[in-house]
Image: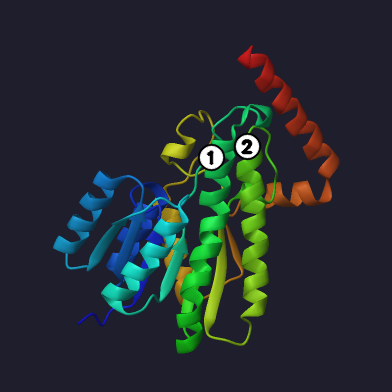
Amino acid sequence: MNNRPVALITGASRGIGEATARELAQRGYALVLAARSVEPLLGLAAELTRQGCPALPVPSDMTKSADVTRLVRIALEQFGRIDVLVNNAGVGDRSFSFDEATPESVHEVVSTNLLAPIELTRLVLPSMRERNSGAIIFIGSVMGHIAMPQAVLYSTTKAALRGFSRSLRHELSGTNVRVSLIAPGFIDTAMTAWLQGVPKSPPSLVARTIADVIDCSRREVVIPGYYHAFILLDRFFPGFVDLVLGLYARWNRRQRK
């Protein structure tokens, strides 16, 4: 019988998801790990299980509603409850500019980054409400605050996820179901491998923040903290930010030609 709290983590095979799985394993959680990349997911689950952490791998595609439903069903069948939901799975824009996006790429980004977290939350929330206990964590982005060119869909979904997180937190006020958003800047993952010459923080920083927020709920955490300066700049000097990002977009287009 499992007496540990149970955390379900999406996008768990690498990057922030993998780091979060390792962090929560060290803090005594049982884990349900979901990702599309089957081999690294199975390898991580096997490693954590050998170390004494119950870790159930559930290969899942967040663009498929049947996989999302199946993921929650398997987690509940195996452990009987979900104490923590970490909505981490995310993908970036597949095209350089939005007019090059295909219907398939739009579906992939919107489904993975926004619709799947909403549906997962809808599925786990009733049992959390019934127990009057639980934590729901959304992994947003600084790009949910500052809309970036060449990342139109990504910025859009992260901004929408931020709105959903805030509204849900207000709706659950007075209960013991906590809702938090983590908004990372550039993190050293496969998604940012193409970026050169910019500071990147390790996924472990995000993982520790997630674990801390589970224990002590906060509405939103921007990490690293220096990104607050850019967010404030966009809020109070939007014309300047528009000018800079517009120049950046035009420079990118010239580089591409």
Q: Looking at the figure, which quarter contains the C terminus? A: top right
Q: Return the residue at label 2.
A: 151
Whole-angstrom CA distance, mark 1 to mark 2, is 7 Å
Q: Is residue 75 left or right of residue 196?
A: left
Q: Amino acid at mark 2?
A: Ala
76 shown above or below 58: below
Crowding near the residue tagged with mark 2, few <14, some 14–19, many ≥20 C-alpha atoms within 10 Å = some
Between residues 229 and 190, which one lies in front from this camera angle? 190
Q: Looking at the figure, which quarter contains the N terminus? A: bottom left
149 shown above or below 126: above
Q: Amino acid at mark 1?
A: Gly
Image coords of residue 162 (percent x, y): 64, 59
Q: Residue at x 50, y 76 (%)?
A: 125
Image coords of residue 160 (percent x, y): 66, 56
Crowding near the residue tagged with mark 1, few <14, some 14–19, many ≥20 C-alpha atoms within 10 Å = many
Coloration of the structure image? rainbow
Task: Mark 1 or mark 2: name the one nearer the start of the chain.
Answer: 1
What element does badge 1 sit on? loop
Q: Residue at x 36, y 53 (%)?
A: 60
Q: Residue furthest left?
A: 50
Q: Residue furthest front?
A: 66
Q: Residue furthest top?
A: 257
143 shown above or below 183: above
| Total number of numbered discs in the rendering | 2
Image coords of residue 158 (percent x, y): 61, 51
Asked whether disc 1 touches disc 2, contact meaning CB atoms under 8 Å apart, the reply is yes
Q: Is residue 227 left or right of residue 136?
A: right
Image coords of residue 153 (percent x, y): 63, 42
Say if residue 152 shows up in the picture. yes
Residue 92, numbered circle: 1
Q: Residue at x 40, y 50 (%)?
A: 61
What element does badge 2 sit on? loop
